[in-house]
Amino acid sequence: MSQEVRVRFAPSPTGPFHIGGARSALFNYLVAKHTGGTFVVRVEDTDQKRSTRESEENIKNALKWLGINWDEGIDVGGPNGPYRQMERLDLYKKYTEQLLAEGKAYYCFCTTEELEAEKQEQLAKGETPVYSGKCRDLPKETVQQYLKEGRPYVIRVATPKDQTIAIDDLVRGHVEFDSNKVGDFVIVKSDGIPVYNYCVVMDDALMHITHVIRAEEHLSNTPRQVVLYHALGFPVPQFAHVSLILGKDKKKMSKRHGATSVQQYKDMGYLPDAIVNFLALLGWTPDSDQEIFSREELIQQFTLDRVAKNPAVFDIEKLNWINFHYMKQLDADQLYAVCLPHLQKAGYASETPAETEMQWLKDMCWAMREHVQYGAQIVDAAKIFFADDFKPENEETAAVLKEETAPAVLKMFSEELAALDAVTADTVQPLFKKIQKGLKVKGKFVYMPIRVAVTGVMHGPDLNVIVALMGRHKVQERLQQSGLI
């Protein structure tokens, strides 16, 4: 690419930061980093009823948490600010006056009732509703008279008739639109605030954006924006419309599919590197079977020509698999930091654990690491240490305690445990062999009844580690509760 690549992410701060928005931000970021270009983040806040600074902060914090840092824009600054649309109104006004003076835009005084009647008439004829343009050719004297009277108005762009609006999309290929179906759309509302499609064109042009990479749902906005680029005399950027993210039922990702916002995944204890790795694979196909990528590898390999047209399916099992890979790279302190908030929320850890409790929690988290795909799962894994209503998890598990040798095994284990000077993983381990020899039973018939009596489940970390973590008193309690000794 001969010119410097400049891309942008321009969210509307109107609610939780959707995972699809994070994917769009990531794709822009990766293109910028891959090409040595510039990544701009700005805010589209013209929807004053719904836009909030709280939502803006949520978006910024989520991007920073994911490590998607920007080179120019809000907070960072740069030569093309301001970077919030509501701070650029004077700039928009200048271009609006230019379009009006050149006859490329006009005042429309049609009432809501008139527009609705026109729409219904077109629908009755089976036509796509498009504004008729009745105010397009109003005499200047009439326009001035109406303005003097204080009649409410909007400003519309004069879309050229009978033209084909074409773009060569970097993902979707050649796409054409009929200008007659675009119509003379509103660019400034009756309250004087410019609409999204208008602001975004001026922002992209004045910020020298070369590539507009965004979700497929924006494709329908593109013909309007191309009309405005031409009307304003700005060069048209390259577009790349990335496919939608679908749930496993092939329907658009929504709350019924589970968590949809970045904050929810952060709150559940997913790791940012795992989320980034997973999002990169939602629509982008590497040229190998590799699925685990460092950021450096993503930056090196990511190109738009490997972004698929087909919708990407959000597979939570794959995310969990990827996150589990990253969880296993954590050391004991890092794993503890990820798990602690969830243990605290469940009431399993103090608000500020003292040294002894902290060490026990670290040891417990480390013991359970093969059973925790993301932070919040530590609560289920840790239940065996805290549950009061302890019992075998199902009939198959309960059947283990009905084995003929189970009472003798539990009795001998209880006696041997009581005789230990100190209960540690190292002192407990030899007891199992001792019971095997003493009762002449195979290892399975020693380990399984003890594990089920102590934990209520048939699988888990090494039994000697579990017993040491649980401690002599609680283990003896559990053995008594089995009713076999």
Image (cartoon, rainbow, N blue to C red):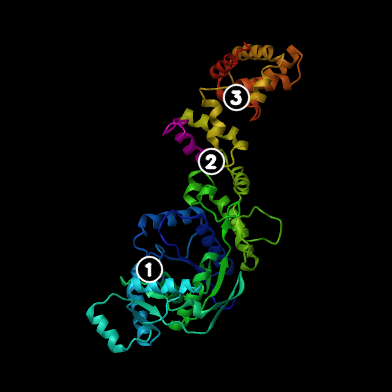
Find the distance from the CA under tag 2 to the CA under tag 3.
Answer: 21 Å
- Asked if residue 179 is among those painted magenta in the image, a careful observer would answer no
Q: Amino acid at mark 2?
A: Gly
Classify residue 431 as left or right of residue 5.
Answer: right
How far from the left and from the top, in percent, is residue 185? 42, 76
Classify residue 255 as left or right of residue 48.
Answer: right
Element at label 3: helix
The quarter holding residue 77 reads: bottom left
Find the distance from the CA under tag 1 to the CA under tag 2.
Answer: 38 Å
Mark 1 = which residue?
85
Mark 3 = which residue?
455
Judging depth in this view, the residue of 295 and 136 nearest the camera is 136
Q: Residues within 10 Å of mark 1 (few under 14, many from 20)?
A: many
Mark 2 = which residue?
375
Asked if the residue at tag 2 contacts the one at tag 1, i.e. Cβ–Cβ closer than 8 Å, the answer is: no
Work out whether 61 lies above or below 442: below
Nearest to N terminus: mark 2 or mark 3: 2
Residue in view at x 68 percent, y 16 percent = 402
Magenta span of residues: 335-354
Asked if the residue at tag 3 contacts the one at tag 2, i.e. Cβ–Cβ closer than 8 Å, the answer is: no
Work out whether 78 lies above or below 357: below
How far from the left and from the top, in percent, is residue 442? 76, 19
Q: Amino acid at mark 3?
A: Thr
Classify residue 145 as left or right of residue 225.
Answer: left
Q: Nearer the viewer, mark 1 or mark 2?
A: 1
The quarter holding residue 438 reads: top right
